Image (cartoon, rainbow, N blue to C red):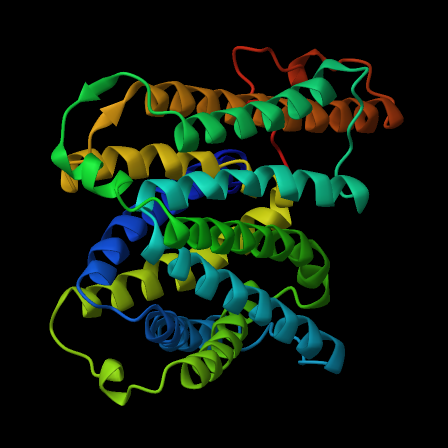
Amino acid sequence: MVSEALDSYGPYVAQVMVQIMYALMNTIVKVALEDGLNHYVFVTYRQLVATLAISPVAYFVERKDRPPLTFKATIHIFLMGLLITINQNCYFAGLNYTSSTFASATNNIIPVVTFILAFFLRMEDVNIKKIRGLAKVVGTATCVGGTLIMTLYKGTQLLRSSFWLQQWQLLGSTWALGAILLFASAFAWSVWLTYQAWVIPCYPAQLSLTAFLCFVATCECAAVALILNHDVSEWKIGWNIELLSYVYTGLACSAFGFFIQSWCIKRKGPVFSSAFNPLATVVAAILQIVCLHESLHLGSVVGGVLVIMSLYFVLWGKAEDKNDQLIVSRRASGLEQVEDVVITVREPLIKGQHS
């Protein structure tokens, strides 16, 4: 019963938790960056904390089930670690030049890119002649529209704050550079999500895989930091917001976050995992209003509603895919009664998700 409930509801709950943690990360790190945090040093320490946290757990929990680390698996882990390095360095450099809400908003292209990659790599079935296929396409397009509205359109000011004016005064060359870096980060993360669908069967010990990924990413991020940053004083750790950012992002967003992403991809696929990214934008916008006293504009509200709708459409389409698979499986087994697995529009997130 517990195992069945975990398979049915676990991925949804886990993904919501991860997106909330990512949104909180944006706020914490943005404050730290404004306080002088070097983003190259930050991503290195973040991955180091994650490695130290998850490695002992992986060692003891999977010591009897851990498969040998083959040459093929090592290459996969190195490349996945490289994608993490690109994603992390580009993302936090972009965050430094823009804002946490904008950074979260650009992440909403991740479901789009992941969906396209999965489609061309034949990991995702899309039949626009059926409503489930159309729902996934419409959901993906709605996600793009909501992201563009949140990013480019302000509209009527609903809550006033002088901080918003300060933020928009930053628009210029640095903001454009930040946007480019953030889009590069989102693309790297999309490739990482899709790539995992190949790597997990090659090395199914997920805790150990996460530990190896964090270790490789630590080494690669350290190499980048040492090449691009020669100020030794910036590696000094003090009792401040910087230390909080290292510990929080290392434990919650890398160690726990990477493991949860792998766990969900193994059960639901890369498109399912990426579909939850829009939630982080909505949560980040709320956190900036509450914690950083930014203004709330109509564009943020409209865009937020659209990205939530896009999430519903994509998940409904995925649920219908699973429903069709169950019907085919039951008919192949000679079972004619399939009514109990039919999903309605009202309950797409509850039924039919028994992987």
Nearest the viewer among 238 and 339 is 238
On screen, residue 248 above or below 154 = below
Above or below residue 134? Residue 103 is below
Q: Nearer the viewer, residue 212 or 30?
A: 30
Q: Position of residue 277 (x, y in %)?
A: 47, 39
Name the residue rendered at 78%, 22% in the picture.
327
Quarter of the image for residue 341 reads top right
Q: Give the image location of residue 297, x and y in percent.
A: 27, 23
Residue 196, compared with residue 304, is above or below; it is below
Give the camera-side residue of 70 and 118.
118
- Write the residue at 67% across / 78% down: 74
Q: Is residue 187 left or right of residue 198?
A: left
**Could you tell me residue 313's position as x and y percent?**
58, 21
Quadrant where the C terminus sits is top right
The residue under the point 68% across, 57% down is 195
Locate residue 340, reporting x and y percent: 65, 15
The residue most toward the front is 172
- How many numbered marks appear? 0
Examine the rendering and report whether any part of residue 29 can be seen: yes
**Residue 10 showing in the rendered view:** no
- Name above or below for residue 87 compared with residue 341: below
